[in-house]
């Protein structure tokens, strides 16, 4: 039987796109896929293939792991706002001389009727709120709530939606809604109506799973503060879909097979 050259792909995961990529690669006998999860969610949905949970110890630690496990390709499919992990991935790929691809779903685009206010950070978003509303639907996750915990925001009320319960510091007046997407439009409309929301705060994470809140906000005529996503590290190629990432992996093992032939 002919020897099959196997390409080991490490996927830095935690997103829907990462899971879809692992599903696509797991059935290919020419590919071994390992997904790394940060471990910030208590009960993550595990993708197919090998899975590891936890940090690597920065860029150098990740580079050591790539070498020790003979990784041939690295795909950064973390959340668009996981800037530290993306920087570590770029550093590790350079140190270990492993090809790196960033998998990033496209960001959202404003439509007619949207009342969007752009912010460069959570702190900047918090600073915009007093002039925009009093009852805030905060959908930026449980990390970074300290930006909304200042005394200058004590007059505001926050509905905080996250997968796991947040830890202090948190806004002074807050109700927590533990939930995981995808969310539908009817549900988002009802949340805004029932809680009398008059301003929405979100990160530009893109994708369809959490986009209905933007439509609901548009219909209700309420402003939306959109936190801009950080850029991908310079020089790192970007795939917009899991299908594009699969093609990138296929090209790598095709090149590897040709080189070993």
Image: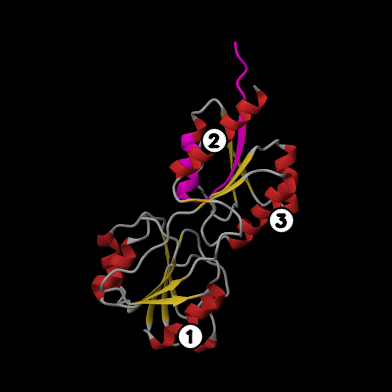
- Give the residue at mark 1: 153
**Residue at disc 2, secondary structure:** helix
Helix, strand or loop at label 3? It is helix
Measured along the vertical axis of the image, is residue 101 above or below residue 127? Answer: above
Cα–Cα gap, marks 2 and 1: 52 Å
Q: Residue 185 occupies which quadrant of the picture?
A: bottom left
Q: Residue at x 62, y 42 (%)?
A: 52
| Closer to the camera in the image, 223 or 112 | 112
Task: Please tell me which residue lies in front, 113 or 143.
Answer: 113
For the record, the magenta segment spans 1-24
Q: Which residue is mark 2?
A: 251
Quick one: label 2, few (<14), some, or many (20+) residues within 10 Å?
few
Q: Would residue 124 appear left or right of 53 to someone viewing this image?
A: left
| Residue 129, quarter of the rendered image | bottom left
- Dot 1 falls on a residue whose secondary structure is helix
- Judge the density around disc 1: few (<14), some (14-19), many (≥20) Cα neighbours within 10 Å: some
For the C terminus, give its image quadrant.
top right
Q: Is residue 99 above or below residue 91?
A: above
- How far from the left and from the top, in percent, is residue 189? 26, 67
Question: Is residue 19 one of those drawn in magenta?
Answer: yes
How far across and how far down the image is residue 82, in percent? 57, 60
Q: How far is mark 3 from mark 2, CA to CA? A: 28 Å
Which label lies toward us, 3 or 2? 2
Scheme by which the image is coloured: secondary structure
Earlier sequence position, callout 3 versus callout 1: 3
| Residue at 49% in and 65% down | 141
Q: Check contact, mark 3 vs mark 2: CB within 8 A.
A: no
Q: Residue at x 65, y 28 (%)?
A: 259
Residue 58's label in the rendered image is 3
* Rendered-image quadrant of the N terminus: top right
């Amino acid at each position: 039987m002919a020897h099959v050259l196997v390409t080991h792909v490490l996927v830095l995961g935690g997103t829907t796109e990462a899971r879809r990529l692992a599903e696509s690669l797991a059935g290919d006998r020419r590919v071994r896929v390992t997904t790394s999860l940060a471990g910030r969610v208590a009960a993550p949905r595990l993708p197919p293939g090998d899975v590891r949970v936890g940090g690597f110890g920065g860029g150098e630690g990740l580079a050591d792991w790539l070498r020790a496990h003979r990784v041939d390709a690295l795909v950064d499919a973390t959340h668009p706002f996981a800037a530290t992990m993306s920087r570590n991935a770029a550093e590790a790929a350079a140190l270990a001389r492993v090809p790196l691809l960033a998998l990033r779903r496209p960001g959202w685009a404003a439509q007619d009727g949207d009342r969007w206010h752009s912010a460069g950070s959570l702190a900047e978003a918090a600073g915009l709120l007093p002039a925009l509303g009093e009852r805030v639907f905060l959908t930026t996750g449980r990390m970074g709530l300290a930006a909304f915990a200042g005394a200058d925001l004590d007059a505001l009320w926050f509905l905080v939606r996250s997968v796991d319960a947040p830890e202090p510091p948190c806004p002074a007046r807050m109700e927590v809604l533990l939930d995981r997407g995808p969310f539908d439009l009817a549900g988002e409309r009802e949340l805004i109506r029932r809680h009398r929301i008059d301003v929405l705060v979100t990160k530009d994470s893109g994708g369809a799973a959490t986009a209905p809140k933007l439509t609901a906000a548009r219909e209700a005529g309420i402003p939306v503060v959109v936190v801009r996503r950080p850029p991908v590290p310079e020089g790192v190629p970007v795939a917009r879909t899991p299908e594009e990432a699969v093609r990138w992996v296929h090209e790598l093992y095709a090149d590897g097979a040709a080189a070993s032939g």
